[in-house]
Image (tube, rainbow, N blue to C red):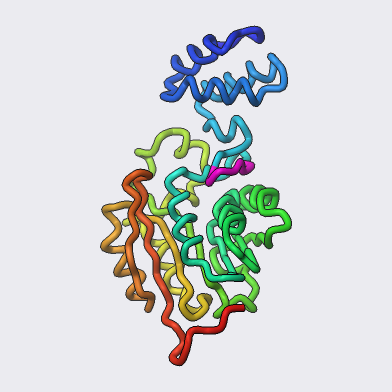
């Protein structure tokens, strides 16, 4: 149902409801707040009703108390992933070195840098569209690279990373087609498909992580509840000390793999 340029909020709500939007009232309010004109409002509503993710329609996502740009074709940061950022902030030492792998929009790394005393922030993604978006969001906070996992990172980071965020894809290949169309159609498959059991990318990250982590540094990844036991073994097999953190409120499962401290003493704070 097209929205007339002079339509009130209630007409927008109705159009979104008919399109199947569960949170039609909230979305209508955001669309009205975003549109600079009646014609733009009509365009935004039509795009949302056609199935484009709300964040792609608005051009931003609300994450960890801030708005981050999210361009079309870029993975949308999920609210549950705020739990991962919060746990990372609790682990980050003073003047920490942070790396955000599979960074997407760069929201995780930028959010962590905003709430922690990060001395360095480095982020990377294999998707060119994500890299462009992340560079806008991270700006002067750090550096963003294009490439596969650790490959584009400066070699000087080896053995120095205090917090390694890796929001890797963890949806099993056979389950990708079961995802909502918003994700399945409009987000890059490389950001969703985690291989046969969903943990292929996590295995690659865990295998290389010890070479990049500082003594006592931690890798943080998300997984589903049903993957947690296998994911724990993945981290343990890589030589990391694993633990599982759960937020029932956000329905989030975060795994932390911590590297061993140096044989003598913990390294001095920078």
Q: Position of residue 124 (x, y in %)?
A: 60, 60
- Residue 160, by quadrant, is bottom right
Picture residue at 33% right of the left edge, 52% below the top: 224
Q: Position of residue 52 (x, y in %)?
A: 53, 30
Picture residue at 68% right of the left edge, 61% below the top: 142
Picture residue at 46% right of the left edge, 18% below the top: 19
> Position of 167 compared to 160: left or right?
left
> Position of 96 compared to 251: left or right?
right
- Is residue 166 depicted above or below 239 in this figure? above
Q: Position of residue 85 (x, y in %)?
A: 49, 55
Q: Nearer the viewer, residue 246 or 227?
A: 246
Q: Position of residue 256 (x, y in %)?
A: 39, 65
Q: Is residue 172 visible?
A: no
Image quadrant containing the C terminus? bottom right
> Position of 159 compared to 230: left or right?
right
Query: How many marks do you count on the picture?
Result: 0
Q: Which residues are magenta?
A: 63-69
Q: Looking at the image, which residue sits at the far bottom?
A: 264
Residue 129 lies within the magenta run: no
Q: Is residue 218 visible?
A: yes
Picture residue at 64% right of the left edge, 53% below the top: 131
Q: Nearer the viewer, residue 90 or 61?
A: 90
Q: Main secondary structure of the magenta part?
A: strand
């Amino acid at each position: 149902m097209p929205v007339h340029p002079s339509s009130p909020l209630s007409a927008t709500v109705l159009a979104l409801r008919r399109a199947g939007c569960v949170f039609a009232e909230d979305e209508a309010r955001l669309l009205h707040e975003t549109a600079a004109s009646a014609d733009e409002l009509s365009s935004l509503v039509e795009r949302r009703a056609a199935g484009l993710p709300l964040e792609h329609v608005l051009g931003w996502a609300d994450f960890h108390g801030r708005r981050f740009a999210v361009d079309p074709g870029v993975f949308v940061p999920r609210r549950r992933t705020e739990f991962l950022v919060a746990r990372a902030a609790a682990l980050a030492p003073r003047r920490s070195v942070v790396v955000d792998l599979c960074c997407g929009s760069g929201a995780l790394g930028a959010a962590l840098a905003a709430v922690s005393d990060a001395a360095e922030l480095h982020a990377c993604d294999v998707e060119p569209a994500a890299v462009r978006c992340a560079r806008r969001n991270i700006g002067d906070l750090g550096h963003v690279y294009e490439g596969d996992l650790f490959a584009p990172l400066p070699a000087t980071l080896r053995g120095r990373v205090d917090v390694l965020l890796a929001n890797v894809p963890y949806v099993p290949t056979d389950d990708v087609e079961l995802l909502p169309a918003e994700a399945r159609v409009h987000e890059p498959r490389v950001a969703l498909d985690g291989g046969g059991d969903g943990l292929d990318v996590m295995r690659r990250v865990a295998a290389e992580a010890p070479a990049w982590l500082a003594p006592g540094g931690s890798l943080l990844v998300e997984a589903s509840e049903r993957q947690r036991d296998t994911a724990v073994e993945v981290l343990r097999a890589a030589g990391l000390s694993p633990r599982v953190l759960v937020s029932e409120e956000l329905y989030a499962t975060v795994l932390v793999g911590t590297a061993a401290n140096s044989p003598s003493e913990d390294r001095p704070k920078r």
